[in-house]
């Protein structure tokens, strides 16, 4: 029912994203404290919309360039 209502009302979609972010934060803290299984935690965070990203720093002649994989321009 909730997901059906989210499709009908865009305001509820923002609430759903906030709830997902709170759950992801709790799972992340639990896996870092060894309270949760890391593999299951990562899988669940990805199911909730968390994305992998990696940052590469390149220094060239004093100019610092930051590249983030998976980002859209």
Image (cartoon, helix red, strand yellow):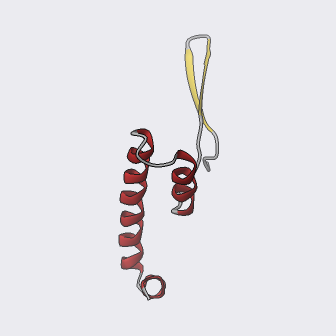
Towards the viewer: 23 or 12: 23
Task: Report x, y in % for residue 53.
Answer: 58, 42
Task: Report x, y in % for residue 40.
Answer: 55, 53
Q: Quadrant of residue 8?
A: bottom left
| Quadrant location, the N terminus | bottom left
Residue at horizontal 56%, vertical 11%?
62
Residue 72 left/right relative to 14: right
Towards the viewer: 73 or 68: 68
| Residue 21 sits above or below residue 39 on the image | below
Q: Residue furthest top?
A: 61
| Residue 11 sits above or below residue 63 on the image | below
Residue at horizontal 42%, vertical 75%?
13
Task: Report x, y in % for residue 9.
Answer: 41, 85
Towards the viewer: 25 or 69: 25
Task: Report x, y in % for residue 44.
Answer: 53, 59
| Residue 64 sits above or below residue 69 on the image | above
Residue at horizontal 55%, vertical 50%?
42
Residue 24 left/right relative to 54: left
Residue at horizontal 41%, vertical 66%?
17
């Amino acid at each position: 029912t909730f997901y059906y209502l989210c499709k009908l009302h865009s305001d509820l979609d923002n609430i759903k994203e906030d709830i997902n972010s709170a759950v992801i934060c709790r799972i992340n803290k639990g896996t870092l404290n060894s309270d949760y299984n890391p593999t299951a935690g990562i899988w669940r965070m990805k199911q909730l919309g968390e994305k992998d990203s990696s940052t590469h720093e390149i220094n060239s002649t004093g100019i610092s360039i930051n590249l983030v994989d998976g980002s859209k321009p």
